[in-house]
Image (cartoon, grey):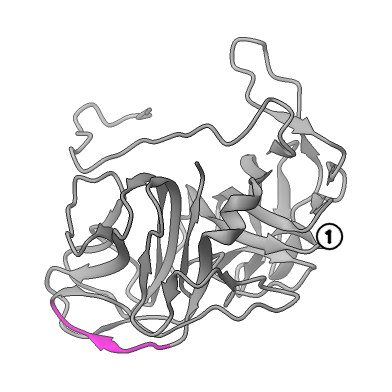
Amino acid sequence: MYASSDNSWNVQGESGFSGAYVGPLTVEGFQADLNADSRRGTGWYESVNWRISGQSSSVATLFRNGNSFNTANGRYTAPVDGTYLVSMNARVDAAASGYIRLVSSINSGRNYNGGLHSLDGNPSDGTETMSVAGIVMLKKGDYISQFLYSCCDNSWYLQHESGFSVTLLHDQSGSVGFMADLSASPLYGRGWFKPTSYNTHGSSSSRLFNSGHFDDITGTFRAPLAGIYFVAANYRFDSACGVYFRVQVAINGNTDNNNGLMAIDGGPACDYASFNVEGMMWLEENDRVEVWVYSDSDNSWYTNTESGWGVTLIS
């Protein structure tokens, strides 16, 4: 962590960190860094011109196994049918008006109801990072890329400190997991609430899926066997103007803020704000996983249907 000027701040105990082995050194996938800054305006833009090497050996993390990622056009094309783990972050500079979207786009669909979407309704006129992560079940030949959208600002920058990665998971991941999009947007008040009613029916631009272990009515995933699982949640809050809000991945109904799978915002944009949580978790057979949301003081706000989450078995 780094502070440019503030000489007194805290890392709170509700922070987390996780990792897991997902395959051999030859596992299909890549990690890329944007090669240069680019000035953008209003409308949709696909992020192009990435690099997969060029770091010093002491900090090298970029890689590409296989030839499925095109660094010039920024598109990863699935070499086989399978379950893929996707992660994106975008540094946005000088975006002073309107809102910005970040979408993990499949086949140029730019579908923000595919569970892989983040939105900032009050972007910083300085610097900020947007992120999104999740699981998709791609067909051979599907391609996935990073898209950003500005509704109103005609002069902002996608900075080169942005990243994009895709990893093919083993066959067992597709047989135990799901990726879902929220299909209801109820009014909430103060306290804890569990969003319910999800869509897991995929399309050529979303590739949602459900192995049968997720109840899309109640919003509950039950682990069919013990193991390490990956979870990602991307939630959009609307009209959230209170003191602070949370998104929590809860195991067996326990909204434990110290399980490493929580996001909090003490001053979200009152129009639209995104919360993103991802990480690994150990589950026992029949453990229950759900996403819960919380408002400390605002008694009238919404979770927008441009929200989604997913879980998949890693090992």
Q: Position of residue 205 (x, y in %)?
A: 72, 74
* Quarter of the rendering containing residue 277: bottom left
Determine the residue positioned at 73% across, 66% down.
106
* Tally of numbered discs: 1
Please identify the residue farthest to the top as the structure is shown.
58
Q: Which residues are magenta?
A: 184-190
- Look at mark 1 in the image and give the residue it sits on: 140
Q: Locate residue 128 relative to residue 113 in the image: left or right.
A: left
Residue 100, percent across and down? Answer: 56, 66
Looking at the image, residue 85 lies above or below residue 287 = above
Q: Is residue 145 magenta?
A: no
x then y, percent, for residue 313? 49, 51
Left or right: where 110 falls relative to 102: right
Few, some or many residues within 10 Å of mark 1 (<14, 14–19, 20+): few
Name the amino acid, label 1: Lys
* Residue in the picture at 45% in, 56% down: 232
Is residue 189 a member of the stretch shown in magenta?
A: yes
Residue at coordinates 37% horizontally, 48% vertically from top-left? Answer: 226
Q: Is residue 267 visible?
A: yes
The dominant secondary structure in magenta is loop
Tell me which residue sits at (29%, 53%) in the image.
262
